[in-house]
C-alpha cells in the first residue's frame, strides 16, 4: 500500500508538477518524501523528453495542422518571448509553475538547448519549486481548505 502512495506522487509530478505536492499531502507523505518524489517525477519527464523532444514537437505540429489549429497561439508567443529573453534558464525556472515538465522540456529541446543544459537547469528549478510548493501545501493547506 505504501508503494502506491509513492507511485501516485511520482506519476502525477511527471505530468503536472503543481499536483505533486497536493497529492503528497493527500496520501499522507512527509514533507521530504513529497519533495523528493516531486523532483523525481519531473526529472524523469525531463530525461525522457530531452531525448524525444524534437520528434515529439514535430508530431505535435503535424497533429495541430491536421486539426487546423493556429500555429501561433497566445501561449506559444509567450513561450517564444521567454526563450528570447531568458533562454533555457527562464524556461526551466517557469516550467514547474507555468508550463508542465513535458512542455518546458520540449520547448528547450526544440530551441536547441543541449541535453546537459536542459537537465541541469530543470534540476535546480525542480529542487527549488518542489521545496517551495511542498512547503506552501504542507504549511498552509489546512488554511486553504477552510476557504475552498
Image (cartoon, helix red, strand yellow):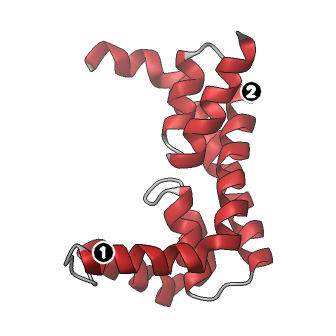
Residue identifier under label 2: 33
Sequence-first disc among 2 and 1: 2
- Mark 1: few, some, or many residues within 10 Å (few <14, many ≥20)? few
Which of 97 and 70 lies nearest the eye of the viewer? 70
Residue 100, placed above or below residue 1: below
Which of 107 and 92 lies nearest the eye of the viewer? 107
Q: Is residue 138 left or right of residue 61?
A: right
Residue identifier under label 1: 64
Q: Position of residue 33 (x, y in %)?
A: 74, 27
Give how far apart the Cα atoms at labels 2 and 1 are. 38 Å
User: Can residue 133 be seen in the rendering of this structure?
Assistant: no
Which of 47 and 122 lies nearest the eye of the viewer? 47
Q: Position of residue 121 (x, y in %)?
A: 71, 68
Which of 130 and 62 lies nearest the eye of the viewer? 62
Q: Is residue 113 left or right of residue 72?
A: right
Asked which secondary structure carries label 1, the reply is helix
Q: Quadrant of residue 142?
A: top left
The residue under the point 58% across, 42% down is 13
The residue under the point 58% across, 15% down is 27
Q: Position of residue 85 (x, y in %)?
A: 49, 87
Q: Quadrant of residue 36?
A: top right
The residue under the point 75% across, 28% down is 32
Q: Quadrant of the C terminus?
A: top left
User: Can residue 122 be seen in the rendering of this structure?
Assistant: yes
Q: Nearer the viewer, mark 2 or mark 1?
A: 1
Amino acid at each position: 500500500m505504501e508503494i502506491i502512495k509513492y507511485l501516485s506522487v511520482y506519476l502525477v509530478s511527471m505530468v503536472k508538477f503543481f499536483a505533486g505536492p497536493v497529492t503528497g499531502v493527500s496520501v499522507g507523505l512527509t514533507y521530504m518524501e513529497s519533495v523528493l518524489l516531486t523532483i523525481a517525477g519531473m526529472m524523469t519527464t525531463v530525461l525522457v523528453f530531452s531525448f524525444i523532444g524534437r520528434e515529439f514537437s514535430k508530431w505535435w505540429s503535424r497533429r495541430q495542422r491536421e486539426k487546423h489549429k493556429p500555429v501561433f497561439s497566445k501561449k506559444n508567443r509567450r513561450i517564444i518571448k521567454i526563450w528570447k529573453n531568458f533562454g533555457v534558464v527562464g524556461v526551466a525556472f517557469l516550467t514547474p509553475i507555468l508550463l508542465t515538465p513535458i512542455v518546458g522540456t520540449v520547448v528547450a529541446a526544440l530551441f536547441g538547448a543541449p541535453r546537459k543544459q536542459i537537465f541541469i537547469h530543470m534540476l535546480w528549478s525542480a529542487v527549488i519549486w518542489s521545496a517551495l510548493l511542498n512547503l506552501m501545501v504542507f504549511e498552509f493547506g489546512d488554511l486553504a481548505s477552510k476557504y475552498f
